[in-house]
Image (spheres, rainbow, N blue to C red):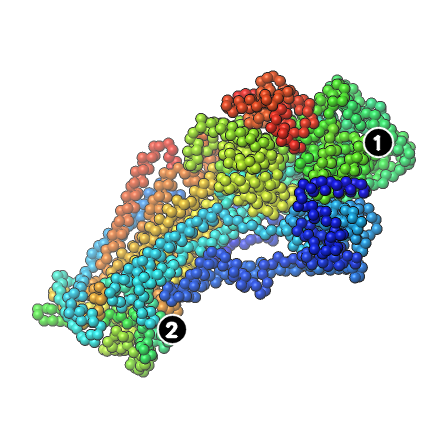
């Protein structure tokens, strides 16, 4: 970094004369390209940029419009459960509610089911750091020294597994989707694995090693808000429980904003759902565990498809369009000024 | 002797009585008070007892008080290093800020980053400085150690012998014995020198870089002894000044046991660090030791300068601090409100370790501190480091500029100050010395006038013209020289040799040059090689004027013939004798340059008896005595003898002389061959010649303190008056006849700037007369000439005529830019001389007021002189000075010349170097009276303002927009101001500074003549402080040091006058013309580069940090970051640091050629156009805009998605990187391979680093974990789409502005950039077009007329007003004006507001000479005849000098 000026060899010292080298570098005569903002370059750059942006913008808008998305706020629809959860002493009482909705047209392709939270500041500084990645890697670490405080140990000294505020406040609603076809109710098959990043699932999160999972977590306790210990997160799938549970991994990837969505399930494309979700009536069966009303939060469940350019957010396309328009307009303005000034004598442009 | 001492004592008491405070210490008889009471009054005096057996008790008492000779320049010791160094480092604000952040980060409540990470930058910075300091200090320590342990021989009273001791063991009062070439260990009073005359030679190169030898004299009373000095017998006590740093002043006295006092001064002090030369043994007593020596007291450390940009930058940093405060406050309040909104704590609000929550107010307060840590980068600490690096690079490039390299001296430019390169681009005022800076300080004898007859030395002038070509080719040089010699020159062999010797030296001088095909002229500075300060060829070879030569020879012949009517020739002889004798030149032979010729070679009788020689001398004496040597009456004949009537007679005589010479030279050659055995001839000429040739070396080297002296000696030598040897007592001159005349020097009254003259008092060996030869400034000498009142009328007329003519010639010389000196003599009779000598001795023995007394005696002697003639010495203008000055002027730089020279010379040099133009109106202000000065300033100011308002009211308006073309130069008339030192004094003391400055603002250039070094620096400081401008001082001599140090940028010229100016300077160049490229090109570049870089750094930091700030609005002001902090740290450190650094070193907005061709481009920097508050604010706003774009485009894109914190931060980081780099790319005007590589390299490095870091690190950086983020992002098309559009949107406005400016703006810089693209020839054409357009716009005709007689010079001096009045009265002899008549006149003038022009017409000035001639002895300054009647000045006029302007005599009302 510091050799910036003296990169060419300094041969001057060796010679008896103190005459400086007549090298292009030392005489500051290096061949150089001197960009000039002539009218031609300026106009071409403006118009080219404008055209390009407009083109991309149109593509993006088109592709964003092809995204099908349905978003259902269930924080009010399950007002009973919501009230129940406001009192934290009812933490172990179960509460279920169901939400109906109708799809007016088919959602074709891969359908992703998200849960959305509003006003949940996962990006709060003290919240973000309240985790121990080492523990989540299955290492036996002294979490007292980690940033998990105060969610490290219980008063009796039993360490929490996993520790930290993020893990403690994990989203624990369970949502099931049912398709009401001609009064028969078909449960939509949902995939609960493969939703997280491959690297998270296989590298970043590891269960502690032991002959079975419960013994691996022996000597630790579940976080206070949890209803069951980590090794019971998914009782059906041995590879999806403990720290490597997809829901847990996804929760641990803290969101950038207070309003966010996390991938919860994917629709398994089998049987009548091979092409996606057909139009019709659907019902969400929700086991309502996660309290949001005490921080004025809201909960959503979202069904959406994705395209190459991301989700349904049309902003990028709009940005391109606006930018392209602005650049093109500027180009025209400059052309106008140029034409007007060209006749003037003081104008120095060639 | 006793008598004189008594009277001296009386004088002290008389003088001392004026200041009673001095009396006790002075009158303290040491032997009574000190010996009995050891309590010494050491506040004022230092009392030294010798360290020998007799006085060792006293010595013991005192020596403990004085510091020893051990020196310690180190700052630290082993134990104090760490605490002291840390203490000093934490005095820096930046380090304290870092430290504060570290401490903050240790509190868990506000911790943002890892504690260790925040400490990292601080530790790195501290360690780096610490290592640097330690190494520096260790070097100093080692250096001290070697110095302290060097050996010298000191007298040991136990062993009664000189023993070897280390320097550090030398104590005050010790006797030190010094050998030849030994370095002096302390300040030592010289008591003994092996030289028989008690002289000791010193080389002071270590102190001031001057290589010529200085003489030191043994304290009086000790010099006579011939035996070796015996310390045991030294019974005296020495009383002298307390230590001070004045290298040129020292006084004290020695009290002998019998209460007799012997005074001494600096002439007897050997200074520490100097080297003894040419003296075998010198013994002295230590007066000051160690840190109290004058050398050490003068040894100030380097001065830290802060450039203008840095000052501006520090201001802006405070603005940034304000911004930071506001942002932190927003965060704190926001967090407080956000926290207070919750009735119950949500799960994401994490309590502290004990499960407690903070109150909103406290949380807000903590958040404030957290935000400081988070946004710390807003204060660009990295900027300081970057600036240092960039400046190093800039200095490196300046240093390597081949155009600033001087081949003759083999010196590139030296950049001594590393941190003010960019100031070079912002200079508004240049203060320049004249001699040696504008001129070469190579004195060449050009013309002389003797007895009113001018000898133009045409041949010499021709020689000087061709000299440059001669320099190029040594062979041709020799040949040409050969041909140009007058055929009858007796001295031919000698001259030939003279020319040959330097040639040899030149050829061997230095090695070849590669790479740069440029001829280098020889001669100059070859002294540098040989370490001897001898004059160059150009100064040494004077081709004699054939007319004068003939006359000289004729004179010699006539002396020989013992013609009784030789009087008219003798003044010629006297003139050349004075040239040869009246100086302090040291003589050495060519073969042994360092060995003084002190003893005149014994004249071998070679057959002639002494009686015969004596007889000849007697006859000579008779001849001279009877006529011209003695009295004023006889000298009156001189003028007559050269009158035009006698020309025929002369010619006849000359012819005869020529013939004789031919024969003589022919014969002499013969004689030479035979080895001077021919005794048979009776011709005296031959006898003398034989004597000469057999015994004398023909070639001498002269070492003079000032180059003019040497020039005069060489001139005399050209006319065969060769200075052969010089000792303090005797001086030997070889006459044209070959006679060696040895004069006893009775006194030498050295040159000083107050008297402006020097004299030698010699006893003529033949006539035994006591003759005073005086040489000095014409203004002084002319007033001291003998009053011709007692002479009869014809004589008086003749004297008057000679004087007139000489004055006319002098004026002509001065107009030619020659340095003039008048030569005069005076013959004393024995009685007068004895009286005076007593007086002088008294003065010399005095301690207090000695300087005044000596001055008084000198003035007493130098009166009633007889004018012999005058000389004109040319100090040639350096190459390219007018061009440089014109270019700098065009660049909008005001150039002032501050010189100690006299007004005429300075004005002429100013004209010849185009500082003043012929059409300029020049105001001259010379006065000594405050009221006069004030009214003059008012008057002039009024006039100038009137002129400006009438002729160009738009000027000031345009001054605001300096880039516009029409703004440049004012139409006619322009003003110049000439002011002298006395007037400056009045201005400073009378509080007239503001008026003076107001006036100078209108003036194109200002000349301060006769300025002392102190005044020079005061002027610089005044301008710098009051006008708040950037100043540059350039000078070459020790007298410029204070001025160089006072300015913002000091430039030293490593020239002829030693190294002192260079030592004090920030940049040292070898030629004035280098200033052009240094300022116009390097200054411009450095300024533009650095200014843009600084602005860019501010922009970069603000735009980056703001990203974090915006995020706070989305995370509850909790201080979260979406970017991993390693990537954050690296962002500033590596990813975005290289391009701006490279930009700062290498960017060239305009090519060097165009910058030189269009000096007006410099104004860009002068007006700080690139970096000022408005640009700073605009840049800040742009930074805010860009950061908003860089944050919100990704935010809106990822809004309401499943993006996680780091996945959101990563594109932001990338986008911001691209934006910042592209921004830099927009700013860059030059793209070399380096730029391209670093630009692309930065992006590539960022990507590689991120990829590796995000892949390699799973848990290495808890609790943040950006694992696999980059990889994931790179597989997402949204990322690429974002990275494409966001920088475009962010930079669109800036690019739009640039495009508008680049295509439609008429800024000169842009035009110049466009010029750069054109092919060479077309480029020149366009530059010409631009310049001419500018000039026609301003209406200034670019005519560069030659200096002609019709220069109209506006004088705003009261004296000239009077003179004007005098002219209007048709009466040049206006001394009849009474004061009462004068006053109404003067009052009238301001009311009428008229100007007075005076013409430099020859006829008028001759009349003036006559006028002033009538009052040669008026003690006040004689400016014009009118001045005599000016009461105001007469009352004050008790000065010896006067900035006379003799030629400005008649005035014409405008």
Relative to B29, B327 lies left or right: left
SS of the residue at dot 1? Answer: loop
User: Residue A329: x percent and y percent?
Assistant: 28, 43
Q: Is residue B910 above or below residue B376?
A: above
The x and y percentages for residue B788 are: 74, 23
Quarter of the N terminus of chain B within the rendering: top right
Residue at 63% over, 60% down: B142
- From this view, report whether residue B702 is shown above or below residue B1145: above
* Residue at the far top in the pictured view: B1370
Q: Residue at x 35, y 55 (%)?
A: B327
The 10 Å Cα crowd at callout 2, few under 14, some 14 to 19, many 20 or more, is few
Residue B960 in sight: yes
Dot 2 corresponds to which residue?
A145
x, y percent for residue B216: 74, 46
Task: Find residue B444 and report its horizontal and vertical position in percent.
Answer: 68, 34
In the displayed structure image, the side of residue A118 where residue B1007 appears, left or right: right
Q: Which of B1262 and B851 lies nearest the eye of the viewer?
A: B851
Callout 1: chain: B
Q: Name the residue rendered at 75%, 45% in the picture.
A: B263
Q: In which chain is the residue bearing label 2?
A: A
Q: Is residue A110 above or below residue B1235?
A: below
Residue for badge 1: B767
Label 1 to label 2: alpha-carbon separation = 109 Å
* Residue B1204 visible somewhere in the drawing: no
Q: Residues within 10 Å of mark 1 (few under 14, many from 20)?
A: some
Foreground of the two, B232 or B587 = B232
What element does badge 2 sit on? helix
């Amino acid at each position: 970094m510091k050799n910036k000026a003296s990169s060419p060899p300094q041969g001057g010292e060796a010679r008896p004369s103190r005459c400086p080298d007549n090298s292009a570098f030392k005489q500051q005569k290096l061949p150089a390209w001197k960009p000039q903002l002539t009218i031609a370059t300026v106009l071409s750059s403006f118009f080219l940029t404008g055209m390009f942006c407009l083109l991309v913008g149109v593509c993006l808008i088109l592709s964003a419009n092809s995204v099908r998305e349905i978003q259902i706020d269930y924080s009010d629809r399950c007002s009973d459960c919501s009230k129940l959860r406001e009192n934290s002493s009812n933490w172990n009482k179960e509460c279920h509610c169901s939400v109906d909705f109708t799809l007016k047209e088919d959602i074709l392709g891969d359908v992703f089911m998200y849960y959305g939270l509003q006003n949940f500041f996962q990006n709060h500084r003290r919240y973000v750091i309240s985790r121990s990645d080492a523990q989540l890697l299955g290492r036996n670490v002294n979490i007292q020294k980690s940033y998990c405080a105060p969610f490290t140990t219980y008063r009796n000294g039993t360490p929490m597994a996993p520790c930290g505020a993020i893990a403690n406040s994990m989203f624990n609603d369970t949502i099931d989707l049912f398709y009401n076809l001609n009064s028969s109710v078909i449960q939509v098959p949902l995939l609960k694995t493969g939703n997280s990043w491959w690297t998270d699932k296989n590298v970043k999160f590891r269960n502690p090693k032991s002959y079975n999972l419960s013994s691996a977590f022996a000597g630790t306790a579940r976080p206070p808000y949890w209803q069951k210990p980590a090794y019971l997160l998914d009782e059906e799938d041995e590879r999806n429980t403990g720290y490597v549970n997809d829901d847990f991994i996804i929760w641990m990837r803290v969101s950038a904003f207070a309003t966010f969505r996390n991938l919860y399930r994917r629709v398994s494309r089998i049987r009548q759902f091979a092409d996606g979700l057909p139009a019709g009536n659907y019902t969400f069966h929700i086991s309502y565990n996660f309290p949001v009303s005490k921080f004025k939060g809201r909960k959503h469940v979202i069904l959406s498809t994705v395209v190459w350019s991301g989700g349904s957010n049309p902003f990028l396309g709009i940005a391109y369009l606006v930018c392209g328009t602005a650049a093109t307009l500027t180009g025209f303005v400059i052309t106008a000024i140029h034409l007007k000034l060209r006749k003037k004598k003081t104008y120095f442009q060639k | 002797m006793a008598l004189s001492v008594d009277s001296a004592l009386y004088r002290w008491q008389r003088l001392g009585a004026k200041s009673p405070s001095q009396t006790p210490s002075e009158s303290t008889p040491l032997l009574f008070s000190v010996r009995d009471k050891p309590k010494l009054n050491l506040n004022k005096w230092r009392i030294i007892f010798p360290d020998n057996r007799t006085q060792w008790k006293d010595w013991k008492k005192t020596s403990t008080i004085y510091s020893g000779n051990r020196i310690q320049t180190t700052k630290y010791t082993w134990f104090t290093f760490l605490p002291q160094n840390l203490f000093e480092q934490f005095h820096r604000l930046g380090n304290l800020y870092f430290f504060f952040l570290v401490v903050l980060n240790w509190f868990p409540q506000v911790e943002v980053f890892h504690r260790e990470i925040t400490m990292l930058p601080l530790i790195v910075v501290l360690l780096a400085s610490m290592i640097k300091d330690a190494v520096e200090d260790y070097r100093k320590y080692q250096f001290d150690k070697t110095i302290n342990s060097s050996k010298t021989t000191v007298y040991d009273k136990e062993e009664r012998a000189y023993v070897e001791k280390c320097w550090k063991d030398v104590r005050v009062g010790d006797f030190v014995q010094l050998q030849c070439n030994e370095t002096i260990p302390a300040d030592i009073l010289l008591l003994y020198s092996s030289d028989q005359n008690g002289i000791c030679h010193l080389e002071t190169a270590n102190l001031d870089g001057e290589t010529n030898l200085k003489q030191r004299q043994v304290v009086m009373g000790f010099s006579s002894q011939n035996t070796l000095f015996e310390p045991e017998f030294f019974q005296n006590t020495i009383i002298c000044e307390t230590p001070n740093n004045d290298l040129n002043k020292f006084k004290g006295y020695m009290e002998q046991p019998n209460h007799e006092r012997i005074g001494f001064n600096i002439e007897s002090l050997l200074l520490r660090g100097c080297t003894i030369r040419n003296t075998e043994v010198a013994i002295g007593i230590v007066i000051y030791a160690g840190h109290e020596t004058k050398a050490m007291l003068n040894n100030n450390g380097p001065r830290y300068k802060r450039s203008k940009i840095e000052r501006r930058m520090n201001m802006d940093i405070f603005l940034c601090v304000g911004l930071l405060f506001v942002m932190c406050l927003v965060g704190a309040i926001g967090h407080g409100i956000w926290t207070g909104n919750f009735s119950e704590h949500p799960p994401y609000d994490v309590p502290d370790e004990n499960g407690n929550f903070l109150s909103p107010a406290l949380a807000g307060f903590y958040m404030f501190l957290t935000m400081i840590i988070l946004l710390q980068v807003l204060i660009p600490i990295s900027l300081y480091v970057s600036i240092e690096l960039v400046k190093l690079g800039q200095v490196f490039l300046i240093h390597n500029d081949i155009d600033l390299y001087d081949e003759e001296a083999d010196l590139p430019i030296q950049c001594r100050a590393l941190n003010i390169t960019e100031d070079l681009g912002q200079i508004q005022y240049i203060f320049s010395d004249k001699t040696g800076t504008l001129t070469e300080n190579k004195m060449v004898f050009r013309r002389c006038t003797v007895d009113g007859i001018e000898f133009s030395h045409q041949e010499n002038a021709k020689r000087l013209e061709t000299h440059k070509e001669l320099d190029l080719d040594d062979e041709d040089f020799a040949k040409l020289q050969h041909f140009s010699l007058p055929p009858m020159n007796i001295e031919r062999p000698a001259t030939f040799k003279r020319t040959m010797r330097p040639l040899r030296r030149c050829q061997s001088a230095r090695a070849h040059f590669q790479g740069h095909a440029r001829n280098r002229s020889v001669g100059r500075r070859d002294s540098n090689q040989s370490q001897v300060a001898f004059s160059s060829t150009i100064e040494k070879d004077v081709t004699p004027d054939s007319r004068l030569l003939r006359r000289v020879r004729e004179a010699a012949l006539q002396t020989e013939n013992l013609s009784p009517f030789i009087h008219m020739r003798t003044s010629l002889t006297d003139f050349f004798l004075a040239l040869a004798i009246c100086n302090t030149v040291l003589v050495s032979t060519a073969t042994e340059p360092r060995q003084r010729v002190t003893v005149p070679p014994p004249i071998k009788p070679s057959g002639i008896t002494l009686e015969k020689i004596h007889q000849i001398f007697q006859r000579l004496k008779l001849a001279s005595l009877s006529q011209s040597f003695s009295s004023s009456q006889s000298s009156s004949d001189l003028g007559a003898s050269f009158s035009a009537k006698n020309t025929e007679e002369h010619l006849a005589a000359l012819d005869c002389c020529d013939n004789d010479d031919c024969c003589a030279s022919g014969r002499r050659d013969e004689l030479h061959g035979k080895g001077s055995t021919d005794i048979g001839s009776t011709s005296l000429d031959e006898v003398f010649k034989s004597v000469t040739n057999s015994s004398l070396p023909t070639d001498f080297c002269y070492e003079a303190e000032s180059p003019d002296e040497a020039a005069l000696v060489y001139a005399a030598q050209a006319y065969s008056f060769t200075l052969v040897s010089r000792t303090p007592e005797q001086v030997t001159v070889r006459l044209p006849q070959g006679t060696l005349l040895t004069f006893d020097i009775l006194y030498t009254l050295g040159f000083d700037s107050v008297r402006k003259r020097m004299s030698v008092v010699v006893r003529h060996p033949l006539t035994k007369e006591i003759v005073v030869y005086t040489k000095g400034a014409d203004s002084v000498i002319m007033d001291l000439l003998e009053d011709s009142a007692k002479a009869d009328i014809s004589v008086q007329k003749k004297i008057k005529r000679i004087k007139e003519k000489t004055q006319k010639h002098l004026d002509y010389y001065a107009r030619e830019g020659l340095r003039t000196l008048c030569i005069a003599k005076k013959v004393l009779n024995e009685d007068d001389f004895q009286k005076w000598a007593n007086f002088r001795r008294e003065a010399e023995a005095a301690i207090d007021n000695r300087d005044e007394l000596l001055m008084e005696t000198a003035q007493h002697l130098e009166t009633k002189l007889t004018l012999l003639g005058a000389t004109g010495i040319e100090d040639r203008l350096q190459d390219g000075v007018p061009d440089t000055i014109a270019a700098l002027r065009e660049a909008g730089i005001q150039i002032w010349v501050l010189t100690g020279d006299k007004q005429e010379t300075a004005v002429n040099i100013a004209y010849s170097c185009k500082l003043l133009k012929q059409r300029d109106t020049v105001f001259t202000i010379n006065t000594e009276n405050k009221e006069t000065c004030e009214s003059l300033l008012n008057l002039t100011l009024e006039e100038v303002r009137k002129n400006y308002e009438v002729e160009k009211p738009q000027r000031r308006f345009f001054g605001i927009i300096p880039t516009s073309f029409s703004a440049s130069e004012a139409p006619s008339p322009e003003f110049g101001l000439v002011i002298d030192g006395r007037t400056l004094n009045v201005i400073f003391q009378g509080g007239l500074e503001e008026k003076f400055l107001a006036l100078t603002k209108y003036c194109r250039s200002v000349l301060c003549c006769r300025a002392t070094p102190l005044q020079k620096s005061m002027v610089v400081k005044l301008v710098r402080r009051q006008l708040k401008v950037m100043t540059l001082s350039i000078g070459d001599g020790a007298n410029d040091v204070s001025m160089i140090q006072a300015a913002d940028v000091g430039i030293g010229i490593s020239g002829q006058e030693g190294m002192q100016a260079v030592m004090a300077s920030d940049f040292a160049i070898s030629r004035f013309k280098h200033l052009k490229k240094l300022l116009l090109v390097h200054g411009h570049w450095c300024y533009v580069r650095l200014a843009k870089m600084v602005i860019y750094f501010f922009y970069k930091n603000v735009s980056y940090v703001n990203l974090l700030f915006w995020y706070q609005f989305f995370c509850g002001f909790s201080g979260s970051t979406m970017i991993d902090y390693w990537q954050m740290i690296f962002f500033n450190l590596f990813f975005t640091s290289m391009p701006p650094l490279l930009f700062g070193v290498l960017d060239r907005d305009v090519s060097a050629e165009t910058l030189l061709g269009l000096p007006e481009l410099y104004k860009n920097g002068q007006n700080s156009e690139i970096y000022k508050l408005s640009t700073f604010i605009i840049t800040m706003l742009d930074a805010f805009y860009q950061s908003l774009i860089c944050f919100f485009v990704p935010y809106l894109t990822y809004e309401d998605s499943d993006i996680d914190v780091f996945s959101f931060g990563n594109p932001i980081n990338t986008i911001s990187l691209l934006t910042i780099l592209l921004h830099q790319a927009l700013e860059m005007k030059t793209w070399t391979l380096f730029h391209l590589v670093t630009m692309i390299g930065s992006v590539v490095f960022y990507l590689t680093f991120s990829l590796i870091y995000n892949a390699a690190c799973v848990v290495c950086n808890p609790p943040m974990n950006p694992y696999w983020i980059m990889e994931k992002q790179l597989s997402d098309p949204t990322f690429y789409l974002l990275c494409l559009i966001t920088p475009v949107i962010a930079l669109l406005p800036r690019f739009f502005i640039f495009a508008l400016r680049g295509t439609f703006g008429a800024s000169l810089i842009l035009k110049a950039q466009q010029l750069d693209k054109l092919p060479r020839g077309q480029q020149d054409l366009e530059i010409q077009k631009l310049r001419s357009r500018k000039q026609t716009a301003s209406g200034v005709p670019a005519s560069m007329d030659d200096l002609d007689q019709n220069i109209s010079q506006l004088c705003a001096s009261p004296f000239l007003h009077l003179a004007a009045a005098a002219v209007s009265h048709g009466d040049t002899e206006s001394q009849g004006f009474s004061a009462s008549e004068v006053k109404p006149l003067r009052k009238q003038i301001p009311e009428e507001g008229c100007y007075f022009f005076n013409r430099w017409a020859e006829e008028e000035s001759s009349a003036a000479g006559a006028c002033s001639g009538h009052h040669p002895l008026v003690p006040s300054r004689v400016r014009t005849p009118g001045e005599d009647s000016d009461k105001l000045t007469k009352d004050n006029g008790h000065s010896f000098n006067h900035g006379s302007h003799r030629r400005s005599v008649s005035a014409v009302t405008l």
